[in-house]
Amino acid sequence: MVLLLLVLLLAAYLGFELIHRIPSQLHTPLMSGSNAISGITIVGAIACFSFDSRLTDIIAQVALFAATVNVVGGYVVTHRMLRMFDAPAANNTPASRPAQHEGA
């Protein structure tokens, strides 16, 4: 149990240090892509349901919910970020373009 706590604390410290040192321009693309790694947590939570313990089931349910929210949130952020780079199709119609004056 002490070893698991040590691994948790070390992972939290290293995660904080790594995220803290990433430039802000790279933070959103990197985090939205790495949130998909939470799929591993989903698989682990599903595997925990095979144990015959009420406590394990509760922890697995919480882990499954949290990891699913993280994965969906990562894809939503990625989709919003990629949409910023799309050419605006609605603003490209002749009615939405500003009038151009000849001779100006």
Image (cartoon, rainbow, N blue to C red):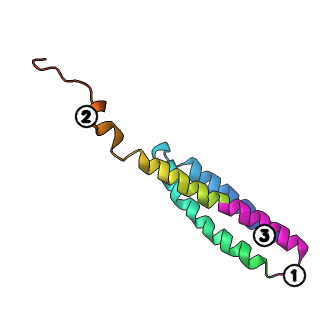
Would you name the residue on which mark 3 appears? 60
* Residue carrying label 1: 52
Position of the N terminus by quadrant:
bottom right
Which element carries disc 2, helix, strand or loop? helix
Q: Is residue 26 visible?
A: no
User: In the rendered structure, which amino acid carries the disc numbered 2?
Assistant: Pro
Residue 23 is situated, as x and y percent measured from the top left of the image, at 48, 45
In this rendering, the answer to whether 61 lies above or below 14 is below
User: How many neighbours does mark 2 have within 10 angstroms: few (below 14), some (14-19), or many (20 or more)?
Assistant: few
Judged from the image, the secondary structure of the residue bearing numbered disc 3 is: helix
Q: Is residue 48 left or right of residue 14?
A: right
Look at mark 2 in the image and give the residue it sits on.
94
Q: Amino acid at mark 3?
A: Ala
Q: Which one is earlier in the sequence, the residue at label 2 or at label 3?
A: 3
Q: What residue is rendered at 45% in x and 44% in y?
A: 25
Q: Height in image: 64 above or below 27?
A: below
Secondary structure under the numbered disc 1 in the rendered image: loop
> Residue sitting at 66 percent across and 62 percent down?
68
- The percent coordinates of residue 44 (x first, y second) are 70, 74
Report if residue 58 lies within the magenta region: yes
Label located before the other in sequence (3 or 1): 1
Q: Amino acid at mark 1?
A: Asp
User: Distance of mark 3 from mark 1, alpha carbons?
Assistant: 12 Å
Q: Is residue 83 above or below residue 59?
A: above
Residue 54 seen in render: yes
Residue 41 part of the magenta segment = no
Q: What separation in Å lies between label 2 and label 3 (alpha carbons)?
A: 55 Å
Q: Which residues are magenta?
A: 51-68
Q: Please indicate whether residue 91 sits to the left or right of residue 49 in the image.
A: left
Q: Residue furthest left?
A: 103
**What secondary structure characterizes most of the magenta part?**
helix
